[in-house]
């Protein structure tokens, strides 16, 4: 569905060394799959994602989506192609002075749906997918982060795209809300067969959602594996960065110097429904999953 | 008091002149300054479609007009004024420099308003396949609307005060009346009446502007 072939992106700012944010990346994302891209800050994940819809035009290499080589299109054709590629962002990027319905309507307007009634009908339909029809007439300022992201998902889905690009869609959200949003992404993938690419620095997100994982470091994809490997006992990522990501090291660093042990205790075996998702406890209460990760990652799990 | 009543026709006339000056200068400034401000935003070196060269030139001209002291601008463009309105004195003649000054003034405010918005929604729109025109109309101007209304208010207030300098070319207006009667003729009551009227006018404009801006702003919870 998505095919990146030797994609490189170099930023050349005057007075600075040219910076190669994406370095000769080739990646195939099968139709209907969920591709996770994980890596540390500055690894080039966002740039690579933006290469897919050419928000950032690669310096070299080819990008094809749904059989169309985007890198060979003129501006007008590229805009048409983008109607088939939805995108959501860490900061939601809604138009704050437009209502929820108007925000969703916008993508249809941009896609050339001329009839306003038709737009409103399809916007309502899209809002239904993320269960937020009751907020149609309110403004983004009156929404929680999770609700905003759901509206952004609705906006991206309204044009019925084949691909959904997600740049850290849950990084601004608490763990519970993260789970809710990921659940919607999973649903959308399953129900509509939309190919999803999700960029994140949280292994938790990858584990919950992805079919395949690409690990990025210094602009390169240094490792790829099916996400099912993450659940396989004794799985040992090839690269040190893969090991580190799997080891929960990030989460330990983010939870501060003091390891607070008592608050989470046992891992709850709640059902993974939309309202009470299982990984409601992750992030700060990472202890719940740590033992699991430790087992998977071998020795690396014993940090602190 | 009697004196003021005696001057009512002049005061009336002066108010009409002020309305004429502001009534032409501000709408024209908004009409031409808005696209100019958008142009400055879009073609800035880090804008949607960078054109560093022409941006530097246009920006330079804008700065030049803005930094000209109004009185000097007024005199400097007399030939142009005469060309446009056929005379270099009177209310019509002062409207020209006022407008010339107000256009870049407002354009900068527009540019600032849009620049402040942040790039998130623009980025999302680009990803949705929007054209530059669609982004400007449906996103930037929509989110900048409360700020733009505020900018119109500020411009109007500033130029009510600028218009007081129009006396130099016999432009009239309420500010000029205050100067002529109060400063040159020592008719303090008339001057006070004129100033009170100016203050009232400014207050009214500011009040209306603030109300309108707030009514159009959905970016914060009420
Ligand atoms: N428009 C740009 N101009 C110049 N340099 C850029 C630009 N965008 C990104 N970079 C640089 O490219 C590198 C990769 O950035 P990118 O945003 O892709 O990383 P990332 O993996 O998404 O990081 P994060 O997790 O922090 O979002 C960074 O060093 C960044 O500073
Ligand atoms: Mg990023």
Image: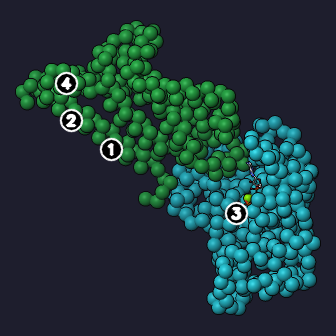
Q: Which residue is mark 3?
A: A169
Which of marks 1 and 2 precedes in the sequence? 2
Point out the frontmost of discs 2 and 1.
Answer: 2
Tag 2, which chain? Answer: B
- Crowd class of label 2 (few under 14; some 14 to 19; many from 20; radius 10 Å): few
Residue B99, image quadrant: top left
Where residue B116 sits: x, y (%)?
55, 46
Tag 1, which chain? Answer: B
Q: Which residue is found at the position 33% from the left and 12% from the top? A: B89
SS of the residue at dot 2? helix
SS of the residue at dot 1? helix
Task: Decide which of B211, B196 is in the foreground and name it.
Answer: B196
SS of the residue at dot 4? helix
Quadrant that contains the N terminus of chain A: bottom right
Q: Is residue A30 above or below residue B24?
A: below
Which of marks 4 and 2 precedes in the sequence? 4
Task: Decide which of B60, A200 is in the foreground and name it.
Answer: B60
Q: Which residue is mark 1?
A: B207
Discs 2 and 1 share one subunit: yes
Which of marks 1 and 4 precedes in the sequence? 4
Quadrant that contains the C terminus of chain A: bottom right
Q: Is residue A247 left or right of residue A156?
A: right
The tally of labels here is 4
Residue A288, image quadrant: bottom right
Task: Decide which of A58, A130 is in the foreground and name it.
Answer: A58
The Cα–Cα distance between marks 2 and 1, rounded to whole angstroms, is 16 Å
Tag 3, which chain? Answer: A
Q: Which residue is mark 4?
A: B183
Mark seen at residue B196: 2
Point out the frontmost of discs 3 and 4.
Answer: 4
């Amino acid at each position: 569905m998505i095919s990146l072939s030797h994609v490189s992106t170099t930023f050349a700012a005057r007075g600075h060394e040219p910076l190669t944010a994406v370095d000769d990346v080739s990646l195939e994302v099968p139709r209907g799959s969920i591709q996770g891209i994980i890596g540390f800050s500055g690894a080039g994940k966002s740039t690579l994602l933006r290469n897919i819809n050419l928000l950032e035009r690669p310096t070299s290499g080819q990008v094809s989506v749904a059989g169309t080589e985007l890198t060979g299109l003129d501006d007008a054709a590229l805009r048409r192609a983008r109607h088939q590629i939805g995108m959501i962002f860490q900061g939601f990027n809604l138009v704050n002075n437009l209502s929820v319905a108007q925000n969703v309507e916008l993508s249809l307007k941009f896609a050339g749906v001329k009839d306003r009634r038709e737009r409103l009908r399809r916007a309502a339909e899209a809002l239904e997918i993320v269960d937020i029809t009751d907020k149609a007439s309110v403004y983004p300022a009156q929404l929680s982060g999770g609700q905003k992201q759901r509206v952004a998902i609705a906006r991206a889905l309204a044009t019925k795209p084949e691909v959904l690009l997600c740049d850290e869609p849950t990084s601004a959200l608490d763990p519970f809300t993260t789970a809710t949003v990921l659940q919607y992404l999973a649903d959308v993938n399953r129900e509509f067969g939309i190919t999803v690419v999700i960029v994140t620095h949280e292994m938790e997100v990858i584990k919950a959602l992805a079919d395949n994982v690409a690990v990025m470091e210094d602009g390169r994809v240094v490792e790829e594996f099916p996400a099912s490997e993450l659940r396989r006992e004794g799985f040992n990522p090839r690269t040190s960065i893969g090991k580190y990501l799997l080891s929960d090291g990030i989460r330990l660093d983010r939870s501060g110097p003091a390891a607070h042990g008592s608050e989470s205790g046992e891992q709850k075996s709640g059902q993974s429904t939309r309202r009470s998702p299982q990984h409601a406890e992750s992030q700060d209460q990472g202890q719940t999953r740590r033992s699991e990760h430790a087992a998977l990652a071998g020795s690396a799990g014993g940090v602190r | 008091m009697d004196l003021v009543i005696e001057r009512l026709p002049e005061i009336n006339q002066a108010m009409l002149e002020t309305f004429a000056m502001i009534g032409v200068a501000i709408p024209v400034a908004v009409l031409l300054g808005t696209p100019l401000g958008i142009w400055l935003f879009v073609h800035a070196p880090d804008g949607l479609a960078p054109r560093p060269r022409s941006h530097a030139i246009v920006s330079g001209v804008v700065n030049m007009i803005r930094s000209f002291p109004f009185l000097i601008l007024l005199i400097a463009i007399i030939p142009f004024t005469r060309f446009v309105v056929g005379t270099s004195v009177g209310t019509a003649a002062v409207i020209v420099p006022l407008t010339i000054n107000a256009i870049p003034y407002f354009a900068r405010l527009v540019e600032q308003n849009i620049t402040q918005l942040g790039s998130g929604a623009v980025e999302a729109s680009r990803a949705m396949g929007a054209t530059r025109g669609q982004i400007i109309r449906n996103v930037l101007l929509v989110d900048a609307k409360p700020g733009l209304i505020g900018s119109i208010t500020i411009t109007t207030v500033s130029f009510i005060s600028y218009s007081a300098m129009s006396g130099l070319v016999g432009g009239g207006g309420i500010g000029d009346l205050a100067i002529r009667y109060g400063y040159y003729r020592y008719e303090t009551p008339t001057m006070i009446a004129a100033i009170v009227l100016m203050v009232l006018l400014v207050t009214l404009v500011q009040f209306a502007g603030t109300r309108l801006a707030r009514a159009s702003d959905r970016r914060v919870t009420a």
